[in-house]
Amino acid sequence: MVLISKTEMFYTRSLFLLFGVGVVMIAPRIPDIKANLQVNNGTLGTLISIGTLGALTALIFMGQIVHRFGALPVLIASATGLYSAMAMQPHIHSLGLFALDQVACGMGWAGFHITINSQGLYRQKVSGRSILSKLHGMWSLGALISAIISIGITSRISLAWHIDVGISLIWLATMYCILRLRGVLLTASDEYEEGARPSVTSIYSFLKKEWVIVIALTMGVMIETAANDWASLFTKEDIKASSSLSILSYVAFTSGMIIGRLNLYRLFLRYSERQLIQRGAFIGGSIFLLGIQIASHIAPQHPKIGLTFAVLAFLGGGLGSSAMAPGFTTIATRNSRFPASFVVSQMSLVNTGIFFLSKILISWVAQATSITTALMIPGAVLLGTGAFARLGSSQSHTRELSS
């Protein structure tokens, strides 16, 4: 077993936290992006969905690139591409240019996402310590920090100043953390010990064997994607909250994710993976579905009570879904003969393709009916994820899994 130093964990956690702050910076200000582009909900959702095409393009070959060149150059290139594209968004008013920018964002996101998760899974494997759930918790904490900052500055600072300054600082801090970690980052040869080099045949073999868990992961995290795209717009348009208060629903969802993920290791001491997935899906899905409906019906007469139920709905959804991404990813890598970066990239490839279709569906349901109705889709999907709980271990952990 390899000992992970406190310095390494600090910069690894910082990398995940910065990633959360950066990629979520736009999410609370989606209403401002919509105003810039002067589009309806259906068109906006479709434009945002186009970003998945860039992610799909990158995911097809990203696992192989990490294997060939190692994590260092991929992290630097993908972070630079992602944050450069994000910095352009406040300045774009053309639908065509915005669509191209979304594709670039998707490619940068996919490269960075695959690489840092592969790094986390690799260090988890060689150290024998479960660190992935806390790393995902740091990502959620970063997202929460970004949302809270937005609450304080939305009415005071323009979208362009917010994103330009914020993204520049995040990029600089990210580069610093990457360089501090360069001595322990995944190299081109670190994961070939299992003899499973990626190829077209191995991709088909992986998907043929692991398609059930890929679908389970996709269902479990769909609500997270929907909250990122629609939480603020739902609270502003359906609940009629002010621009600053509309961010509270996203803050609540992210807070639920943080509470859940940072405490997963304690829950694993008492409950098995099966129990956590099953209960998280049922409780989170139920609270989300009921809370959204109650909020939208009460808000016209009692806006403060409606906002309260909206916040509770998203908080419950965040708590319930917090175990899904780290849980199903850990299960998949534990059961597969393929190296971690390959498993993560292929799982992401499939669920990103499904997200592309689901995002468009949710967008046009929102346009044809309401955002409230559209959000019933990810809520119901989370509820159904409990059917896949059997994929997890039926035994609770007998030792502390935290770092």
Image: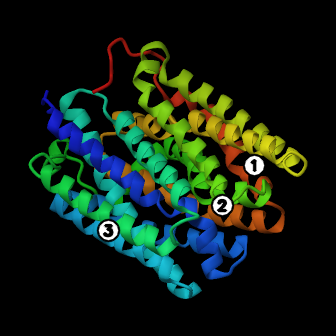
Count of numbered badges drawn on the protein: 3
**Which dot marks residue 376?**
1
Q: Is residue 188 visible?
A: no
**Disc nearer the start of the sequence (2/3):** 3
**Disc nearer the start of the sequence (1/2):** 2
Which kind of residue does numbered mark 3 sit on? Ser
Q: Residues within 10 Å of mark 2 (few under 14, many from 20)?
A: many
Question: Which quadrant holds residue 307?
Answer: top right
Which kind of residue does numbered mark 2 sit on? Ser
Return the residue at label 2: 243
Q: Residues within 10 Å of mark 1 (few under 14, many from 20)?
A: some
Which kind of residue does numbered mark 1 sit on? Met
Q: Nearer the viewer, mark 2 or mark 3?
A: 2
Taking depth in this image into account, of 122 and 45 the one nearest to the observer is: 45
Q: Is residue 26 above or below residue 393?
A: below
Return the residue at label 3: 168
Q: Quote the CA–CA distance across marks 1 and 2.
A: 23 Å
Question: Which residue corresponds to the image point at 31% horizontal and 51% vertical from the top-left?
Answer: 342
